[in-house]
Every structure is written in C-alpha cells, then in structure tokens.
Amino acid sequence: QAADPIKVGMMLPATGTYAKLGSAIDNAFKLYVEEQGGTLAGRSIEYHAVDDESDPAKATENANRLVVRDGVDVLVGTVHSGVALAMARVAKQRDTLFLVPNAGADDLTRAQCSPNLFRTSFTNWQPAYAMGKAATGMGHKTAVTLTWKYAAGLEAVNGFKQAFEEGGGKVVKELTTPFPGVEFQSFLTEIAALKPDAVYVFFAGGGAAKFAKDYAAAGLKDSVPLYSSGFLTDGTLGAMGGAGEGLITALHYADGLDNAKDKAFRAAYQAKYGMPPDVYAVQGYDAAQLLHAGLKAVGGDMSKKAEMRAAMRSATIESPRGNFTLSSSHNPVQDIYLRKASGEENPSTGIAAKALADPGTGCKM
Amino acid sequence: MDFTTFLIQLLNAVQYGLLLFLVASGLTLVFGIMGIINLAHGSFYMLGAYMAFVLTSMTGNLLLTILIGIPLALAFGAALEALLFTHLYKRNHLDQVLLTYGLILIFEELRSLTVGDDVHGVPVPEMFSMSIPLSDTLSYPVYRLVISAVCLLLALGLYLLIQRTRLGMMIRAGSHDRDMVQALGININGLYRTVFAIGVALAALAGMLAAPISSVYPGMGGGVLIISFVIVVIGGIGSVWGALVAALVIGFADTFGKVFMPDMAGLTVYLVMALVLLWRPEGIFRKG
Amino acid sequence: MNSRVSTFFKLAVLLGLAGFPFFGSVFYTEVLAKILILAIFAMSLDLLVGFTGLVSFGHAAYFGIAAYMAVLLAPQSEAASLWIILPLAVLCAGIAAFVIGIFVLRTKGIYFIMVTLAFSQMAYFIFHDTKLGGGSDGIYLDYRPDATIAGFTPFDFNQTSHLYFFVLAALVAVYVFLTLLLRSPFGRVLVGIRSNEHRMLSLGYATFRYKLAAFTIAGALAGLAGFLYAVLFGFVTPEYLSWHKSGDVLLMVILGGMGNLAGAVAGAFVLTGLQEVFADWTKHWQLLMGGVIVLAVLFMPGGLAALPGRIVARLRKGENNG
Amino acid sequence: MAEILLKADGLTRHFGGLAANQDVSLSLERGVLHALLGPNGAGKSTCINMLSGDLPPTAGRIHYCSKDITRLSAYQRSRIGIGRSYQRTNIFTQFSALENCRLAAQSRHPRPWRIFTDALSLTDTLERARAALVEAGLGARASVIAGTLSHGEQRQLEIAMVLATDAQVLLLDEPLAGMGSNESAQMVELLNELKKTRAILLVEHDMDAVFAVADRVTVLVNGQVLESGSPEQIRNSAEVQEAYLGVEEAVHV
Amino acid sequence: MSEVLLEARGLHTYYGLSHILRGVDFTIRKGEALGLMGRNGMGKTTLIRSMLGLVKPAGGSVSVRGVNVTGAPTYRIVRHGLAYVPEGRGIFPNLSVRENLLMSARAGVDGQRAWTFERVLELFPRLAERINNGGGQLSGGEQQMLTIGRALMTNPDLLILDEATEGLAPLLMKEIWRVIGEIQKSDIATVIVDKNHSAVTAVTDRSMILVKGQVVFDGPSAEVRGDPELIQRHLGV
Ligand SMILES: Nc1ncnc2c1ncn2[C@@H]1O[C@H](COP(=O)(O)OP(=O)(O)OP(=O)(O)O)[C@@H](O)[C@H]1O
Ligand SMILES: Nc1ncnc2c1ncn2[C@@H]1O[C@H](COP(=O)(O)OP(=O)(O)OP(=O)(O)O)[C@@H](O)[C@H]1O
Ligand SMILES: [Mg+2]
Ligand SMILES: [Mg+2]
C-alpha cells in the first residue's frame, strides 16, 4: 500500500487569461513536495494534470477525467470559481478529497461546503469585508462600488458593503460592467459626478491594470481614494505603470511580510523558478502543506478518510502568509493585510482584520 | 445626470466609438472589402499590442515602435496570405472560418510560449501623457483624444483608398469575381496579398496605439473580435463610412447602456445590432 | 464512394459504438456519450448550414435553453419523468427557435450570421445576468430524469451505460429522421433554397416558411442535444449558450464537410476527440489543435466527408497509372 | 373574345430619379403571344419583374383573371399560374439539369408534409420535369450538373424550368439569347405550340423569331409605350423603326 | 504576312474527367478578324478560356506574339494586349458603371490610349446616362455595353468577344457590328463568337468551326457564307 504513489489531480488553467495563476499554483505545490524529498508521509506523488481552460462548460468532464478516469486520490483546483463549483460536485459525488488553492466563490465553503472540500485561499467575502472595515476606519462615509458582473465580483462587493455599512458608511451606488469588458470611461464619469468618499472595485488581470490606469488618467486617483481586494494590484503593478502607485488593497498575503517562513519560501521559489512568488503560489504551497498535514496524521493511508479530514480540519498551517487554521466550513481563518502599492510590490501596512473567518452561512456539515 | 456629466458622457461615447473603429479598421478592409472572414483579426490586434510592449521596452518610444512595427506586420500579413489564405479564395467562405480559428489557437499559444502569460503595460508617450481637466473632479487623458484624431484620419484614408482609388475598385471587383479581374490584366494575387497585409498592419497598428490605454494581456484579442465584426456588419459590409457610423452607434449604445440600463449593459450592444439589422437587413449603409 | 460500402461502413461504426460500454471504462463511455450528443447538435446545425444555406452563429442558444429547461422544469428534490421533461425541453427550444426565426430570417448571408449571434448573445446575458438560472455560476441538476412509464422502468439513467445507449439511439433516430427529411420534397426545397433562394421564390415556393420550419426543427434538435448534455453532466452554465459554443459546433460542421450528416458526426468526433488526446499529451495542446485545423483546411477541401471519395479517386488514379 | 388572364394598368416604376416604367398597360390573353420590344434599358425586364412580383410597382394595378394581385408576392403569383424566365440565367447551378426542372415541377404539388416520402418517388413531378427538359431540347443532358452546362445550354434549361411549372401565363425575358440557331428554331416552334393554350409575354431582340410567333407587339421606349398593335403595324411604324429596329431593316423586309 | 498575335497548338482541356478540347490549333494575326462558331457546348468558350489561362489546359501550348505563355497566370497573358468580353457578361455588380470602366483602364502595349473613358461613353451614350448606377442595376443590354466598354478601356490589340451581342437591341447590334468593323480598321484583331452566323461571316475574314472540341473548318469566311451545306452540317441551321 505504501508502495504505490498518491495520485494528485491538478486541474488548473494552462491556457487563457488565468494561465499564469495556474502555473504559479502548480509550481508552488510541487515546490513543497520537493522540499519534502518528493514524498508526503512516506508516499511518493504522481501528478495528473488537466487544463481546465477556465471554462465551466467543460468543467464537469475535466474533473471526471481526473476523478473517474485517473482515479486520483486528491483533486486540486482551480482559479475560476465557476469551474471550481463544478469540480466540487464531482468530488463530492465520489467523495474525493478536493483542495481549492484559489477560487474564492463564497458558496464553496458555504452552501456547497462538504467534508471532502478544503480551501487554502479565501472567500471573495474575506478581503472585501476587511477592506470595508478598513475604509470606515479611515473615516469614509460614502462609497461607490464597481465590478465585473459575475459571481466573484458581486460577492466581493457584498462583503465590502456589509462591513462598510456596519461601520456606519453608505454605499451610494453599485456599478457593474459585463465581464470581461474593459471600457470604464462612462463609470469614471459617473463616479466623478457622484463624488463619493471612496471607491471600491473588484478587477483582476488585464482589466485591473486597465482600470487603474484609466482611474489615474481621469484624475480621480488624487481626489477619490480607490480600494480593492488585492487582486487589483497583484501581478499587475508593472502593467499599470505609475498608475498603481500607492493603491490600497486588502488581501491575505502581502510582499515583505517579516516572517521566516515567507522569506524561506520566497527564496526557494525564486531559486527554482527564476521569478518571485505571488499570492497564488502561496495558496498552492499551502494546499500541499494541508495535504501533508492530513497524510501525516494517517501515516499516508488515504483510506482513513475521516481521520485524515479531521486532522486537516484542525491543522495549523505555517503559511508564508502567517499561520492559519481552518474554519468549521474548511476555509482559512486568516489575517487580512492592508497593503499599499509601491513600485511593483504590495507591502503590508498593517492588518485590516485579524484572524478573519468567513461566516460560512448555509454550510451544513 | 446633470448637463456637464451628460456632455462628458457624450464625449466618452464618441471617443469610445472612434476607438472601436480603430480596432475594427483592419477588418473593414479584410472582411468588408476583400470578403475574407477573418476570425484571427483579434490575434493580429493582440500581436500589435505585444509588439508595442516588446519594442517599447527596447526602444523606449512608442512612435519608433510603430515605425518598426508596421513593416513587420506588413511582412507578416503578406507571408500569411501567401502561405495560407491564397489557397482558399475559390473555396467555400466558411473554410476561412476554420482556418482563422486554427490560427487563433496557434497565435495564442505562441504568444504564451514566447512572451508568457503576464499582464504588461505600455507607457503613454511622454508628449501625450497629460490630462485636460473637464470638471472639478474629472479630467480627460490627452492620449485618448490623440487616438480619436488618428482614427478620423484613418477613416478618411481608408475611404479614399477604397472608394476613390483604382486600387480600391480593383479590390472590390476582386471580391466578386477574381477570374474576371485577372482577365482584365490585373494581378489579383499580388493585389490581394498587399491589401491583406495592409489589413493585418492596420489591426496591429490598432493594437499598438491602444496598448498604452488598454494594457497588454492574454486573451485580449478575443475581446475585440466580435465587436469588430459587429461594427463592420451593421455599418453595411464594404462601407467605410458605415463602419464609422456603426462604431459611433455602438459607442453610444455601450456608454449610455451602462448609464441608463446598468442591469442590461451586456445586452445593449447585441440588442442594438439586432434592431439595426431588422430595421435595415443590409446594414446602415448598403453597399453601393 | 460506393453507397453500399458507405452504408456498410456506417453500420460497422454503429456496431462499434453500441459495443463500447461493454469494453470501455465508465469515463470513456461518458466522453463518448458527450461526443454523440455533440454529434446530434452538429447534425441539427448542418440542417441549417449545410442544407438550407443558413449559417447560424447562434445555435447554442437552443442547446442551452433546453439544457436550462432540463433543470428548471424538474422538481427540486426528486427526479422528473423523462417522458414529460424531454418533450417539454425540446418544445421550449423549438418555440424559441420559431420565435427568433421569425425575426432573424428576414436577413441573409453574413447579416444572418450576425443577427443569430445577436439573439443568442441576448439569451446568454439573460441567463448570465439574472438569477433565473443561477447567474454566472450556473445551476445543477441533482437527479437524472426517471424513465418509468406506467410502472415499468425500461432503463435507468443513473447507470452511465443506459444513458449512453439512450444517447446513441437518439443519434441514430436523428440521423434517420434527417436523412428521410432531406430526401422528401420538403428537404429538396431546403437544398434548393441554399442553392438559389430567389429562383425558389419565383418557382412558387414560400421560402420563408420553409426556412422557418427548418430553423425550428434544427432548434428543437439542438434542444434535444442540450437536454441530453444537461442530463449527462448534471450542470448547466450560461456558457452553454455562448458564442464559443455556437462557434465550436459550427467548426464541427465545417470540418466535417457541410451538407453531409455523417460528416457532421465525424466533425464532432474528430474535433472533440483530438482535443481529448492533445490536452492529455501536453499543455500546449492548442498549438497542435490549431496546426491540425490549419492543415486540414489546406489539404482537405470539402472536409472529412469528402475524404473517402478523394482517397478512392487517388487509388483509382494510381491503378490507372500503374 | 379571348380570355384575358393577366392585365396590367398604368404600371409605373421609379428607380430614384429614373422612371423605368411609366404608365404601362398591357393585357395578356390565352392563345395570344404578346411581344414586348424596346431598346436596351427601355424597361422591359422591369415590366416583367413587376408582373411576376419580383419588384413592387411604384404605381399601377395588376389583375389576374380579374383578381387584383398587385399586392401578391412573387411566390404567390407563381402559385396561381404566372411563370417566368430570366434574362440573366437564374438556375440551381449545383443541381443536375433534371433536378432543376423537378424542383420547378414540384412547386405545383409541394407536399411539404410528406416528410417520409422520397421526392424522387413522386412520379408525376418527375415525369413533368423530364418532359420539360425534352421540350427545351435538353433531354440528353438531364444528369449533367447545371453549372457545368455551356452557356447556351443553361439558357435552354432556364426555359425548361418555366415549362416544368406548367404556368398559364408565361413571362419570357429574352429566352432565345445565347441559344444557337438550331435551338432557336426549335424554340420558336415550341412557342407556337405553347401559345395555343396559354398567355405569353415575350421579350426578345431576335426580330426574325419575334415576327415568326408574335400575335401582338408592344414597343417600350424610355419606360413608356411607344406603340402597340399587330406585328405588321409595328414593323411598318416609322417611329418604331427609328427608335428600335433601325431603318434599313424595314426597307429590307 | 502580319505578325502572329495569339497562337495555340494541340490544346487539350478537361473539366474533371470530361475531355472537352481535343487537340485544337488556333492562330490569329494582327488586325485579323476571326469568327469562332459551333453549336452550344462544342467548346468555344473553353478554347478561349484555355488560351487565356482561366482554365489550365492538360496539353498543348499557347504563345502570344511569339512568347510562350503556357501555364502563365492570366493577367500576364492578357497584358500582352488581349481583352476579353466573356459570355454572360461578368460585370462587377458592386462597382458603379464609372468604376467598372475606370478600374480596367490602361494604355495599350504600344503605350497609346486610343480608347478613353470619354470615347467609350461616346460609343455607348446609354452608359453615360447611367454612369453612377451600380453595375448590378443595369438592364441586360446595358451590362453588355459595359463589358465591351470595359474591355476597350484596356486598349487591346486583340479583342475577344464571346457572344458580345447577346441581349442587344437590333439597332445597337448593328452599331456594334459597325464598331467592330471600325476596330479592325485600326489594326485591332478580333475573335468573335456569335450565334448570328451571317453577321459573323460578314464582318470577319476567317472562320473557324468547332465540333465536339475539334476544329472541323478553318478558312475564309466567304467560303462559309457561300456554303449553306457546311453551315447546315456543323451549325445545324
Ligand atoms: N435596381 C435598379 N436600380 C436602378 N436602376 C435600375 C434598376 N433596375 C433597372 N434599372 C434601370 O432601369 C432601366 C430599365 O431596365 P430594364 O432592365 O427594365 O431594361 P430592359 O428593357 O430589360 O433592357 P434590356 O433589353 O437591355 O434588358 C435601365 O436603364 C436600368 O439601368
Ligand atoms: N466548369 C465546367 N465543368 C464541367 N464541364 C464544363 C464546365 N464548363 C463547360 N463544361 C462543358 O464543356 C463543354 C463545352 O462548353 P463551352 O462552354 O466551351 O461550350 P460553348 O461552345 O462555349 O457553348 P455555348 O455556345 O453554349 O456557349 C460543354 O459540354 C459543357 O457542359
Ligand atoms: Mg432586360
Ligand atoms: Mg460559350
């Protein structure tokens, strides 16, 4: 039994907009395994990979490819929330261990939560809620939100709004634009006319870079502060040119965290892949750590599902982001940092919410 | 909405419309005039944007980049035509759909292999990097206005080329009956190669010009593909003015759709297209 | 190719497909079922593109609408009756196609392509931007429909092989139906419309009605495919209606060779099959896929359907020369 | 008095500023072949297009068997028995010559509901199609793909298709153009046969043929009726000679 | 004897498997007028298209002014001073009348521009009236005029007319025959395919009759005119 390897199914985007995030997760996961000498709890690891193309329409089949065809012991994935939701169903049906290293869909650890599903990233709600809290803390009374009209963005806006209004502020307008549209000029005009105290947005990737540039070019950056979940400025600051300088965002990871784990991780990652790691890499790394924690508890015997899951549930992960534990719905209970962009980095300026747990509403487990 | 805001939105609409025309201009030529269904238009646009990124990081100057980039794009377009497209003119038009779809996959993958999957920025050229204040809170980037101006020039140039020169006549004739054009002593193959190359160069130019404001990222070609077709078609295939008007119409629909029907914003462009084509089944400007 | 040889060949393929679940794994049975469903989808589009000359770029709308109906019309906590929900879903797709057809068929050629796209995109955004079908995250079907009729259960969809056979039977039925349809006076009119609609009008055919009928039938058959797809995967997302999906099926039809039902099936097999294989091989599968497509266009005029004929001709020529 | 099948009153059609037809009135009777002559661009095809429903008139009325059909569309007019041929060959180039005619014949009994019947098994239609091909002199070319027929043969096919529809009113737009002399002669014979039971409007520039078959002639110039009368009357009209026939011709005959 | 303009030797042409031209020899000299006759489907058009390179002959050679152009692209062949008026017109419906004429304009091989836009419009005043109309909106006869005019705009030395008088009204037809006579006087050679045998033999010096892709007669037009039996046998009148 201990002889044959554990099959890990990596279902990540290898093509398209999210390809880079997919490879960061993949890299870091493998980095951790290698650091352990290529084995976890005495068992070697065999990878099976599928490009999920970030296409929900193909998600069920792709997940089946790993779970049913290859019979993987662990399913790892993915970036796109819609795809992850479909994966969760497949994994649940087969009761296969499922680790989510990025997708932030609230539902994964709320209504769709399940004993076999563990997330090492965040809920869309978490950083947004923390940001909302921080924004009221800075004395803002009114805010406008803007996001792509899709689940992740709407969830983030909800989180922000909840915290902002709990803190006595008011969201005066919630703007949305079709995904993945990048023409923001009319929204900027509207924001300028509304003159709120703050703006909260949810964008990532190319759209994020474009938005920050447009925001600055419209002259709004100096008059109306812009806040966001960290994805706005992660990996996009270079593309923003100077437009991203000083932007304040909230996320469960930041550059230059002064902890040993992080330093070691960054050095190792840089050495192996020739580029600095990012939050996605951290999440992938932690997914491997979490798996390791579970395996250690059962001595590598994955048939002891209940035991293994209990161990994972109660593990404390020594993450580069700082230690975290899991909530009862299997989502990290973690510090959310406030970061201020500087150059191409997002160094932390403090903690927006300490040990923030997702409410896990609707999770019956 | 107060009046100033309305005026600014109007400006946004026009400016966005012109930007759309710029993006679609290459397609106006390749699809509208030559009749090639080119789904890879977005890829050529992406190519331009990435070229802007790579070349400006070497030359540090967007203008220089454009000067280098255009001949490169022309050569690339001519090579593609000679290798691939030239074999398809006598076939069913839908074969071009298949071919150009294959090209999208190839270009996308090659981009990923050579430049990677990062998001990149291209700096706005120094001399256009300022903004003009419009209201107490809002100002307008000069570079966008420059693009609008370029776009109008381009529209004029295309119009003159297509409607006023013999070259334009020959291309249009060629889209109808290549044999007959040849039989009149015109080298239709060479002509088509040239014009296709110009079309590719236009798409790349659009990518280069738009790079500073749109940033450069994987999949950016896909985003402009459908909208470009929408513009060429609802303008009336083969009409440059039509495309310009269509681009402005879409610019308006999109801008004011976002303002007045935010919940339906994704739909507006398509709603407008459906309405226009049901009203005028051959586009706003029928071909002459 | 000799028509007897081709019939024989088709029967052999059918036999092979029918035998697959007895030998293949559950996963590949599902993959094959998916391909068969897409083949139905492709044939339905071929009725429009290949035979009637109506290049629809929005065919996924009917596929997706029926898929949504498979979930939305089913009760939350138990299985729906197949014999009620299947006709309902197909009917909905057919009605949608009929209504949309009344509008889009006013246009021609490239304009038709774009209007069909416009309508399908509107349908896409309706599902994507409203809570109707779970928004952008999609919606799940928890119980596959139940085939019990008057107390008797002929097959059980929870067994993949049963579902597979049902799909295969549907494919054969659609193939036979379309073949007969195309031989009939009605079918001849459709082909005439593709060739020269104006002349059909002046010969006294109410071409609009014929086109509308074809559009509706094609929509309903696409709906059949969409329904089966939803049942197979238990999941429906707005992406089912997106233009990518419409494009995919159009590619199958073109690659297969327009105006040939078997070609459409072959197109579905080759495009989906190659992707399965390539994606398994390498993460740069798009490069291979794109390369194959480009080569296929250049060296396979007329698509897969024309291939046997070309090979035979080549062999004949060789014989004559040798 | 012969039975009037098709009657046009005051047909007018403008294309922008151009009046392609101006107040044109015609009537087609069973048993009569009516020739419509006129210089190029006079509006003959436009007139046929309006009668057949391909083009809506700007003004004027059209009656078929004293029913007003001005608003009927092209296919509806064809259904009630108005058939036409085109000046620019308008055939199904990808189909065999026979299938071209079969489709024409099928339009009389479309039977769209019989979707499980093989169209080729409907022998009435098939026979009608074959007969039409033979009448037009293409009997030996039935299985040839229409697009690969020579130009002259395509012209013959154009006529065969109208014949296959078995229309009561035939609107023929230059049926002889492009046909060889042999085929032309054959066609003249056919026209003489057809006109006994039908009403025919013939547009044709081949004067030998026209004067061999026409019972009445109307001459159109610049969209207006210049003269209408018996063939002799027309042939001898100085105005017609000047505008259309050319003077020597008249001297010649 | 004057210079040979266009010459074909032993042309064989296939469409798919059907053998259309079966070894045709063809010559035309500068300033000569040649009538090409034959019943429908005998291969007249195919012969012309083969010589122009619009279909690729399977065997035989074609030369223009002594230059071997077998297999050369059509536009090269034509640039030696040939102009082609195809049967069934072949105007560009998406171009206006003006554009149809202007797009083909070029000087002759000798650098002269005897035929100008104005001169063509003088020949066909009807076209001048419709000058801004779309080509597709012309009447049949007007389209025919346009095709001839377009061919003349290339200032050819050899004008190939494939059923150029189809659909022309009698008056205009006479005018065309007169023009063809004029053209010949200016040393332009013409190849005329037409159903009107008496007219063809009247304006041409030499006649050629094709039957099933083979030349069955090649000689003085006067001979054809004087031999009703020959016409009867090959052209079936
Ligand atoms: N769609 C159109 N748009 C504009 N003008 C048109 C259109 N159709 C025809 N015309 C013009 O109307 C006039 C009459 O055309 P019509 O085709 O009826 O002539 P015709 O008598 O049939 O001539 P022909 O003997 O040459 O065929 C012509 O001058 C033509 O240019
Ligand atoms: N594209 C084609 N494919 C196959 N066969 C063809 C094609 N074009 C012509 N043919 C055949 O070649 C033969 C000669 O045709 P061609 O057009 O040369 O005749 P033609 O002498 O010009 O006749 P017409 O006087 O009717 O114009 C005919 O039998 C015709 O059916
Ligand atoms: Mg006419
Ligand atoms: Mg011919």
Image: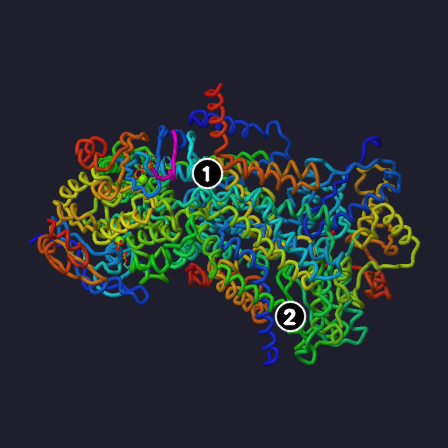
Q: Which residue is mark 1?
A: C174
Front-lying residue, A333 or E218: E218
Q: Main secondary structure of the magenta part?
A: strand
Residue under the point 37% across and 37% down: C183
Q: Which mark is residue D19?
A: none
Secondary structure at badge 2 equals helix
Q: Quadrant of residue D62?
A: bottom left
Front-lying residue, B213 or E142: E142
Split into quadrants, the picture shows ligand 4 in the one at top left
Q: Decide if ligand 2 comes within 8 Å of the CB at mark 1.
A: no
Q: Is residue E86 visible?
A: no
Q: Is residue E7 magenta?
A: yes
**In this view, C191 is above or below A217:** above
Q: Decide if ligand 1 comes within 8 Å of the CB at mark 2.
A: no
**Disc 2: CA contacts within 10 A as few (<14), some (14-19) or many (>=20):** many
**In this view, C320 is above or below D68:** above
State left or right for residue C170 relative to residue E187.
Answer: right
Q: Which residue is mark 2?
A: A187
| Foreground label between 2 and 1 | 2
* Outermost residue toward the top in this view: C322
Q: Is residue D54 visible?
A: yes
**Disc 1: CA contacts within 10 A as few (<14), some (14-19) or many (>=20):** many
Q: If the image is split into quadrants, where does the N terminus of chain B sit?
A: bottom right
**In this view, E2 is above or below D42:** above
Span shown in magenta: E1-10
Residue C261 in percent (x, y) is at 46, 37
Amino acid on which the number 1 mark rests in the picture = Val
State left or right for residue B56 relative to residue E104.
Answer: right
Q: Quadrant of residue B70?
A: bottom right
**In this view, A194 is above or below D95:** below
